[in-house]
Amino acid sequence: MVVLLLCNQLAEADDSEEELLQKATQATARGDFDQAIGVLTDVVTKNPKQSLAFYLRGRENFRAGKIKESVSDLDKHVELELATAKDPKAEARQWERGISYYYAGQYEKGARQFELYQTYHDQDVENSTWRYLCVARTDSVEKARKNLLPISDDRRVPMMQIYDLYRGKLKPIDVFVAAEAREPTKEARNQQLFYAHLYVGLWYEAAGEKELAKKHILEAEKHKIGHYMWDVAHVHADLLRAQDKKVEKKDKKD
C-alpha cells in the first residue's frame, strides 16, 4: 500500500516535495526514523495539504514509539484524503491507524477502524484479531469472541489457526504446530513463528495473562521480518520493558 501511495502522490508533488519524500523513504529503509520524521515535517510545513507525508510520518512516529503523534498524523491523512476526494477508500484502508488507536488506548475508535477495514479487505485474520483486542479492552473477551469479524480464507500460515484460537476453538500449541508444519524454509519458518508468537502474546494479554503475554511478545521481536508488523511487536516489547523499569524503580524506592 505504501508503494502505491508513493507512486500516485509523488507524481502530484512538486520537485522539492518529491525530493524530500524520496529522502524520507530512504531514511526509513535505513531505519533512521528520526531523520524520516524530520524530513516529513519539512514537507508538511511547506505544504500542509500533502496527505502522503502525514501518512508516512504517522507510520514513522509509531515506529519511534510516538503513539499520540502517530494517531494525529494518520487522522490528518484521512481528513485530507476525504476532503480532496483523492481516495474515497482512504479511511477504510487505514489499518495502521487502528493499531495506533489501540496503543493510544482509544479502543472504541480502533474497533471502528477495523470494522471499516473489513469492508476493504474481508479475509484478513489480523484485522479480525485487532478488533477482538479492542473490544476485549472496552468490554470483555467473551463479547470480543462472540463478535469476531468473520474470516474464512486467509491463506497465510498460521493465520487460520490464530483465528481459531481467538474463536476459542484451538489452543496456543496448535498455532505453533501449524507454524512449523510441512518443513518450511528458514525464512518462512521465521515469519510464521513471528506471527504465531505475536498473536498468541496479544491473545494472552487480552486474557489478562501478563507474563505469558510478555514471553511471547518478546519472542516475536526476536523473529525479525521486513514488515510493519515487526515494528508493532518491537514497540510493544519496548512498552513492556519500560513497564519493567518502572516496577524496578518503585521496588528500589520501597
Image (tube, rainbow, N blue to C red):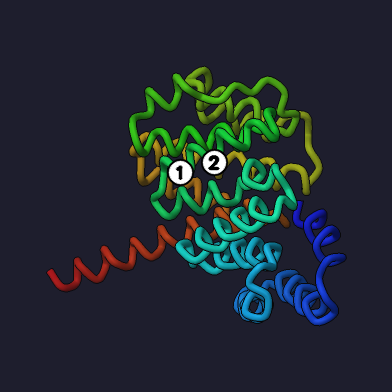
- Give residue 109's mark: 1
Q: Residue at x 41, y 63 (%)?
A: 241
Check contact, mark 1 vs mark 2: CB within 8 A. Answer: yes
Q: Is residue 138 visible?
A: yes
Residue 56: x %, y % from top left: 67, 64
In this picture, is 168 found above or below 72? above
Residue 55, compared with residue 98, is above or below; it is below
Residue 34 to residue 231: above or below: below
Instruction: State the residue in front, 100 or 181.
Output: 100
Q: Which image quarter: residue 242? A: bottom left
Q: Residues within 10 Å of mark 1 (few under 14, many from 20)?
A: some
Would you say residue 158 is visible in this rendering?
A: no
Please rate how many residues cluster around mark 2, counting C-alpha atoms within 10 Å: few if below 14, some from 14 to 19, many from 20: many
Left/right placement of residue 140 relative to residue 183 reads left
Identity of the residue drawn at 55% across and 44% down: 198
Q: What amino acid is labelled 2 in the image?
A: Gln
Quadrant in which the C terminus appears: bottom left
Q: Position of residue 132 (x, y in %)?
A: 48, 32
Q: Secondary structure at mark 2?
A: helix
Give the residue at the far front of this rendering: 84
Given residues 113 and 86, the one toward you in this image is 86
How many discs appear?
A: 2
Residue 39 percent coordinates (x, y) = 67, 80
Residue 58: quarter of image? bottom right
Place of residue 143 in the rendered image (x, y in percent of width and height, measured from the top left): 39, 24
Q: In terms of secondary structure, where does tag 1 sit?
A: helix
Q: Amino acid at mark 1?
A: Lys
| Mark 1 to mark 2 CA distance (whole Å) | 6 Å
Label number found at residue 113: 2
Question: Seen in the image, is 42 located left or right of residue 212?
Answer: right
